[in-house]
Structure formats: structure tokens, C-alpha cells
Image (tube, grey):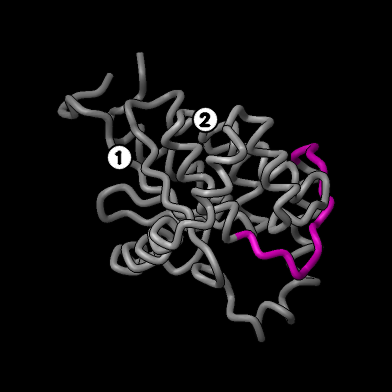
Amino acid sequence: MNLGYPDPKPVFAYFHFRSPYCYLASKNLWPIVDDYHTTLVWRPLGGWDGRSPPDRAKVKVPLARQDLARHCRRMGIPCVPPPITTDATLAGVGSLLAEARGVLRAYIVEMYRAEWAAGLDIGQPEVLNAVAAEVGLEVAEFEAFCHDPANRQRLDANWSEAQDKGVVGVPSFVIDDQVFWGNDRIDFVLEHLNELRLARQ
């Protein structure tokens, strides 16, 4: 029952393809749209936006990878971290084209799988293009889209918007004035949607 919401409720999703916690979230976020009267407002980030700054990231990586391995064991999913030098910005840009072409869900799943299950550097053109082709995107169009400065600037605008909404990291989900930060907060997102009586019948 979805009382009082004639249109799907927007759920803003701020993600970064470089984040291991976004990899985890990519496995269990889908009930948000499958089971509730919502629409996912996809907001990819790039560069260091939404992440720890470089100096702190160097300190956090060993701990984060231990933590990721524990989560992956519990979830029964692969854990093969990519090269530490991976720059996932273009993967974020490319996701905007995937969204426009109606293959965003497959793109998210396959890009994270390439990076965190296969350990590939998704900043490399051959890896990006292989994922694009796998989900049905035309590679030439994908390459041109990813390297268009205007599309890269959309990621910067996403981070500005995120900060205005009170987002401090990824993954984050925002519903109205409620911010849910972390892959382990998705249950709270679902509880909130239930409280709003947005469950599909």
C-alpha cells in the first residue's frame, strides 16, 4: 500500500565505484526499488569525493580490506580487491550513460563485479569497455561519453548536491531529510519505507 504518494518516492543513492562498501551495497540495495513504490535517483561520484582523503586512505586501506573480507565471507560473495591505484571516476561517468540507456542495474552489478570480485582496474579502458559491451552499451558511444568534460562535471555537481543534503560518505541513501550512510544501513532504509507505507502490494 502506498498512501499519499501518487508518484514513486525518490531515493537518492550516492555511490562511488572505488568504495568497497558500495560493492557490498550493490548486492542488497535492490529491494529498495523492487519491493517499494520508489524510484532510485542515481548519483555517482568521482575522484576523492565521498571518500577519505589520500593520506587517511593509505592508513585505512589494510583495515578496510580486512573488514571487506569479513563481510564478503558472511555474504558468500568474492573478495578480490583491485590495484590500489585504480581510479574509478570514468566508471562513474559511464554509469550515467547506462542509466540513460536503461541498463544501469546491470552496469552497477557488472562494474563492481569486475573491480571487487575479479580484482580488475576499472580505470583501464579495456576493462571499462568490456563491462560496457557486456551490458549492451555501444563501446564507441560509451568512450565518447566518458571523456566528455560536461559529463565528468555532473559527478562534481552530484557531490555538491550530496553535501547540501548532509551526506559525508558513500554509500549514502537520502529520502527527504533522512540520510542513511553505509551498506549496513539498508535495513533502516527499508524500515523507513515501510513506515511511509510504500511497500508494493
Query: In this figure, which residue is indicated by the disc labeled 2?
Result: 103
Residue lying at 62% horizontally and 38% vertically, measured from the top left:
139
Q: Residue at x 58, y 50 (%)?
A: 184
Front-most of residues 126 and 37 = 126
Dot 1 amino acid type: Pro
Range of the magenta residues?
A: 75-88
How would you classify the magenta stretch by its main secondary structure?
loop
In the picture shown, does residue 37 fall above or below 90?
A: above
In the depicted view, which residue is nearer to us: 62 or 148? Answer: 148
Task: Looking at this view, name the residue that lies furthest to the top.
Answer: 201
Identity of the residue drawn at 55% across and 72% down: 48
In x, y percent, where is residue 152?
45, 61
* Image location (x, y in percent) of residue 5: 19, 29
Q: Which residue is mark 1?
A: 10
Mark 2 or mark 1: which comes first in sequence? Answer: 1
Q: Amino acid at mark 2?
A: Val
Q: Nearer the viewer, mark 2 or mark 1?
A: 2
